Amino acid sequence: MSIASALRDGPTPKRAVTTAKILTFDIERRPGVYLSWDPMPKFLNRGMQLIRSSSISWAAKWYDQDDTIYADIDHGNTMYSQPEDVPGYREMLEGLSDLLDEADIVVGYNSARFDEPKIRGELVRLGIREPSPFRTLDLIKTTRRMGWDYRSLAETASAAGIPDDEAKTSHQGFSLWTDCLNGDADAWALMEKYNRQDVVLTERVMDLLRPYIKDHPNLGLWAGADDLGSPIPACPKCGSEDLKYMAGKTARTAQTGYGLLECGNCGARDTRANFIKERISLRTVR
């Protein structure tokens, strides 16, 4: 059975059970403004840049809350204003920095290579305090393992069985961004809807793909301890205590075999126990 079929026809994926503060977020950016001799330039150097690309809005959602949070820049004509000259720009970034500072785990789609570095760079430019450390869960890393032809959030949602009418908000394309920078109120209303929906969709994709995520931060770290002070065994991916050993299955490294467990909540089948089932003393020289 394919992943998509398993998600569509199998049990409804279960939510994580954890005290970890999980924040899903997404940013929207404005294009930079450049001078060019050529309508098809290969490289635009720093001297050709008039206005830097920058963030114009963000949306976020706490995993244990239904509502999304949203902030953006001033809705006036800001097409040819440098980011730091736009009213509301600094306040918008300070608000996101405060949320990231609260989070234990931050979820996004292509966030490790795009959203997080972009925000980090803007915080440095403005002298805004860096958020305290958090663990990153970038879902595109899971999508890359699937071998699908396309890896956009919309395509991933479709492959995971989410109907198109429940997925991304449609819009007119690039002109949505230019309309916003020209101060169009309707464009800004659509931008907000689009930004908020991306966050909701990203969280939903995370729950659907949870059993297949290989780099999920270990939620066992937030499972607490029993009366004797020993850590409570919990699924690393969803935090559930509903774990059972898989008969006849062993997780093997180069020299050691460990017990393999399956989660009765999210269905993950790649949790390794610490107890050793088998060990050998010989191995090849590398």
Image (cartoon, grey):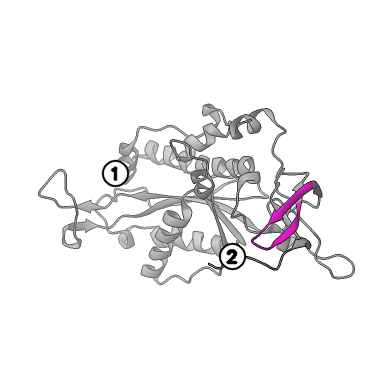
User: Main SS of the magenta segment?
Assistant: strand
In this view, the mark in front (2 or 1): 2
Answer with left or right where residue 121 lies relative to residue 104.
Answer: left
Question: Where does label 2 land, which residue?
Answer: 284
Question: Where does label 1 land, which residue?
Answer: 182
Q: Earlier in the sequence, mark 2 or mark 1?
A: 1
Residue 98 part of the magenta segment: no
Question: Who is closer to the viewer here, 281 or 22?
Answer: 281
Magenta segment = 248-260
**Picture coordinates of residue 50, whole percent (x, y):** 20, 57
From where the camera sits, is residue 109 visible? yes
Q: Which quadrant is home to the N terminus?
A: top right
Answer with left or right where residue 30 lies relative to residue 244.
Answer: left
Q: Residues within 10 Å of mark 2 (few under 14, many from 20)?
A: few
Residue at horizontal 40%, vertical 72%? 127
Question: Who is closer to the viewer here, 88 or 249?
Answer: 249
Give the structural element (helix, strand or loop) at label 1. loop
Q: Residues within 10 Å of mark 1 (few under 14, many from 20)?
A: some
Question: Who is closer to the viewer here, 75 or 41?
Answer: 41
**Compared to 29, does 178 lie above or below?**
above
**Picture coordinates of residue 261, whole percent (x, y):** 76, 51
Residue at horizontal 16%, vertical 62%? 47
Question: Type of residue at label 2?
Answer: Thr
From where the camera sits, is residue 66 visible? no
Find residue 285 and name its label: none
Give the structural element (helix, strand or loop) at label 2. loop
